[in-house]
Amino acid sequence: MTMQIHNEGIYNSLIAQLDKLAHHNRQGSYRTKERYYKAMKRFCRFLAEEYHLQKLANVAPKHLNAYIAKLQSEGKSASTIKTDLAAIRFFHDKMDAKHPLPGNGDLAVKLERRRFGGVDRSWSRREFGLFLFKCWDAGHEDYAAVATLTYYVGLRIHECFRLDTAVAENALRTGAITVKGKGGKIRSIPINESIRTELKKMLTVTPRGHKLFVSDDVPTHIAMGRFQQFICAVRDEIRDPDSTRPMTHHGLRHTYAARTYQELIDSGISPANAHYQVSRLLGHERPDVTDIYLAALTPGGDSNG
């Protein structure tokens, strides 16, 4: 099934530029060239949908940092991200580029070693509660709000940091928050009183028409990176004793998935239907991806959170 691409004209133009570069490339094995080409196509889609970028030669560090933040928010491993970066830099070196790209060590977003598959990445209630206290103690009401949005609504990090006052006001009015996810896919997720409280707080301190969690003088990818660094700084202090679970913002999405699935099962819905509904709420294109998010569920069906 072909996925819909927003700004398809721009995307096709970028692919035409990529094809010209790929046609003249004689370096690397067939497998490497194929892998790099596919990785670059994904980057082209991101550039078209998120930045409406017309020319590959205009790719700048901000595009690279934002793309990495997006991949991390989707749970991509550090090795996968590094492969994509290698592909982007490979083709970038083949063109008359306007901006040099930073090396891995100079990126605004840290490349963290991550573990996936069947690993339970969810947060416990205790860990979530302690994290909120850490946020408040540090004067970061905004970080507490971001964590709450993911814990109770399952938003990706870039979906949180894109929220503006109009989206918040509409959520309070309709009882559901509407976001644009991967591939421009729009979905609405019901909100509870905890979310209402956080949105009302943020609306009191955010000028109308502005983003809730991003100051006008700070690029979005920098704001996301600072939030992720805050989690890294406090996670050893809040992690459950003897826990080996990785603690990242993305893990809160796993917590939301496992808890929502369990609540649906407890309400009498069949496992297949519950799985489908959770997949829709998470904004997954493929339901099988949701299996990764349900690793917190034990064979008996209970989650740790």
Image (cartoon, rainbow, N blue to C red):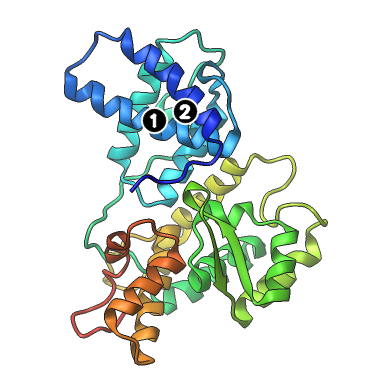
Q: Is residue 300 left or right of residue 253?
A: left
User: Which residue is denoted by mark 1 in the rendering?
Assistant: 41
Residue count near mark 1 (Cα–Cα under 10 Å), binned few <14, some 14–19, many ≥20: many
Q: CA distance from mark 1 to mark 2?
A: 24 Å
Inspect this view and state whether residue 108 appears: no
Image location (x, y in percent) of residue 263: 39, 85
- For this orientation, the residue located farthest to the front is 1
Residue found 59% across the figure and 34% down from its top: 51
Which label's residue is closer to the chain start, 1 or 2?
Answer: 1
Q: Is residue 287 left or right of residue 281?
A: left
- In this rendered view, identify the residue nearer to me: 141 or 180: 180
Residue found 25% across the figure and 29% down from its top: 35
Q: Is residue 67 above or below residue 103?
A: below
Q: Is residue 34 left or right of residue 274?
A: left
Tag on residue 222? none
Quarter of the image for residue 105 reads: top left
User: Which residue is denoted by mark 2 in the rendering?
Assistant: 106
Inspect this view and state whether residue 42 appears: yes
Q: Is residue 156 above or below residue 168?
A: above
Give SS at disc 2. Answer: helix
Q: Is residue 108 above or below residue 23?
A: below
Residue found 30% across the figure and 49% down from its top: 114
Asked if the residue at tag 2 contacts the one at tag 1, i.e. Cβ–Cβ closer than 8 Å, the answer is: no
